[in-house]
Image (spheres, grey):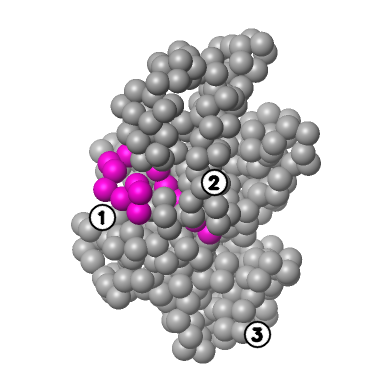
Amino acid sequence: MSTQTGSSNAMFEGVRVIELAQFVFVPAAAAVLADLGAEVIKIEALSGDPYRTLRIADGRQTKSANLAMEQNNRGKKSLAIDLKREEGRELLLKLIETADIFLTSLRPAALDRLSLGVDVLRARNPRLLYVRGNGLGFRGEEANRPGYDASVFWARGGFAHVLTPPGQPPIRPRPALGDHASAMNIAFGMAAALFNRERTGQGSLVEISLLSSAMWTLSADVALSQALNDTELMRVATEGRYALTRAYETSDGRWIQLMFLDPERYWPELCRRIDRDDLLRDPRFIDLEHRIEHGNALITELVSAFKRKSFAEWRTKFHGWDSPWELIQNIKELAADPQAKANDYLFTVQVADGTDVTVVAGPVAFNGSAIPATPLRSPELGQHSEEILRSIGVNAEKMQEFRNRNIVR
């Protein structure tokens, strides 16, 4: 992992983001902006973001840190206030007057109950960017339904269907897969809205949902499904069509993924590298059309060929070949990938007890690195309440009163 501790990538320095959001989808987007220099103020209930104490036995809690909180809330400030009390709500509105972006994952009905809709906040700050993310979009009968990664992005969004082998139970999603994919759409939306405001002076309403993100991610499948009938779709899905764009098992149980989208370019060299020059003369595989027609037979031949050697042996055989193939890595290998180290895809933050925790950087590098100039851990609940409220004129005496009355923590 890189030891680089900073770079000139503070692209959002001077931007104040007020985040009223929970769990992963929306907070992860703010974490990316915090990495890039934005001041992100995380508004929490007095009990905290529920993600702080979520218990689902997946290992996110260690002796030193809640790894999910560190990944999705690094670099932020925490202000804990009771928004159901008028004084607490007014404190938030005063902060809104100083903000560039209001970012929320609350559903429309919840925002209405708190009187924190677009018009209310724009009345306090006409230049405010109002950015919201939810499960199913903000119009239609289901706009107020709860939506999470696994239920909306994975299940309703089509991923469980397209990734589950026929006849098998739906495969389980990985933690926060859709949340993190969708968070980058929010980050893009915020960046675009900031750019537009610089040009026009106008604020924007930005909306992203887990459903919209799933449909965009699967847009190739969705578009194809509308263009072809069921018979044509079944023909496209036939495994034999993909002999040179599939994975093959090695003798030691590892898998090599081929992705030869230009098969005429790679086919002859593949045959030579796997010691099967005879396939070049086989009339079944003499050209692309024949290889598609006899695709299942070709897969059988390639399965047999790849099973003859270990992955280490194949890596030696394929070394120096400028072609798109890769080992299917496990997550431990991914975290130690030399390309990840070379490109600063990981960095460390130091948590409260002094332990270093590794987190993944945002996917976009500026000026050579995606690592924040000053990597900071996730804040403790209410850690910055006094600092933030002092910035809007709340003195020490008033702060103590708010704490005594359980309006602020």
Is 79 situated left or right of 264 in this image?
Answer: right
Residue at 30% across, 75% down: 3
In the displayed structure, 78 sits above or below 8; it is below
Picture coordinates of residue 220, whole percent (x, y): 51, 26
Checking the image for residue 307, the label placed there is: 2
Separation (CA) of disc 3 from disc 2? 70 Å
Picture coordinates of residue 17, whole percent (x, y): 43, 58
Is 221 situated left or right of 285 in this image?
Answer: right
Residue in the foreground of this view, choosing between 386 and 277: 277
Q: Earlier in the sequence, mark 3 or mark 2?
A: 2
Q: Quadrant of the N terminus?
A: bottom left
* Figure label count: 3
Name which residue type carries label 3: Asn
In the displayed structure, 156 sits above or below 390; it is above
Instruction: Characterize the local packing of mark 2: few (<14), some (14-19) or many (20 or more) Cα atoms within 10 angstroms.
Output: some
Residue at mark 3: 404
Checking the image for residue 374, the label placed there is: none
Name which residue type carries label 2: Lys
Q: Quadrant of the C terminus?
A: bottom right
Residue at mark 1: 366
Is 37 situated left or right of 350 in this image?
Answer: left
In the displayed structure, 78 sits above or below 254; it is below
The answer to whether residue 59 is seen in the rendering is yes
Name which residue type carries label 1: Phe
Element under disc 1: loop
In magenta, the rendered stretch is: 316-330
Separation (CA) of disc 2 from disc 1? 43 Å
Residue at 40% across, 16% down: 287
Separation (CA) of disc 3 from disc 1? 45 Å
